[in-house]
Image (cartoon, rainbow, N blue to C red):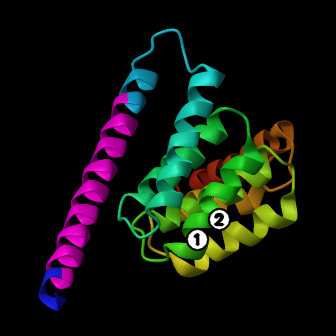
Amino acid sequence: MRRLVLVVVTVLLVAGFISCTSSKEKEIKRIKAYESELLNDKTGIHKEKADTLLSMYDRFAKDYPNDSLVPHFMFKAGDLAMNMNEPQRAISYFDIICNSYKNFSRMPDCIFLKGFIYENYLDDLEKAKSHYQEFIQKYPNNELTSSAQGALDNLGLSPDDIVKKFQEKNAGNIKTDTIRS
């Protein structure tokens, strides 16, 4: 009897694992198909479809929090939400990555994008500054470091002020070059 119980439990565990895996694989295929459909739509991104995809990402992350695809899906969700002009929602996706997936390869991008969103979408210059500084401190050799520094240097300036600053800098360079000649 004991052996029979052990066999039944083992079979149930294996069956449960297989069904869980196939269910996860089906969900991944559905997400990838929906991503493809959304990205290939020549008429643009439709809010309803984008919201559906975000829900799919959320459900996958909830159902399979330890899966290696979760941070990738959360990053795509943050990018999609940002492009849908939903900055708070985008920040929340990037926060999930920053808090739960610290070794994710796109972590620098998450921190930079949080600064970008706070600066350009939410007009919260203090938080933007904080994220840009964090980015520069943690990733001084990243390809986006000069962009983060440029953002810090121009934080709070109007486009006209930035142009004026650039013109003044160039005028100084021209005078210096003329003197050297």
Q: Is residue 181 visible?
A: yes
- In screen coordinates, is 128 left or right of 175? right
**Amino acid type for the residue under numbered disc 1:** Cys
Q: CA distance from mark 2 to mark 1?
A: 5 Å
Residue at the extreme top:
43
Local packing at callout 2 (Cα closer than 10 Å; few below 14, some 14-19, many 20+) is: some
Asked if labels 1 and 2 touch by Cβ distance under 8 angstroms, the answer is yes
Residue at the extreme bottom:
2
Location of mark 2 (residue) = 95
Residue 41 location, x and y as percent? 45, 14
Residue 104 location, x and y as percent? 42, 69
Local packing at callout 1 (Cα closer than 10 Å; few below 14, some 14-19, many 20+) is: some
Q: Is residue 177 above or below residue 8?
A: above
Q: Secondary structure at mark 2?
A: helix
| Stretch of the chain drawn in magenta | 5-33
Residue 78 location, x and y as percent? 59, 48
- Magenta residue check for 13: yes
Residue 150, by quadrant, is bottom right
Q: Secondary structure at mark 1?
A: helix
The foreground one among 139 and 21 is 21
**Amino acid type for the residue under numbered disc 2:** Asp
- Magenta residue check for 73: no
Instruction: Tell me which residue sits at (62%, 32%) in the image.
Output: 51
| Labelled disc at residue 50 | none
Residue 125 location, x and y as percent? 85, 59
| Labelled disc at residue 98 | 1
Instruction: Tell me which residue sits at (41%, 70%) in the image.
Output: 66
- In screen coordinates, is 174 left or right of 142? right
Residue 100, by quadrant, is bottom right
The foreground one among 136 and 108 is 108
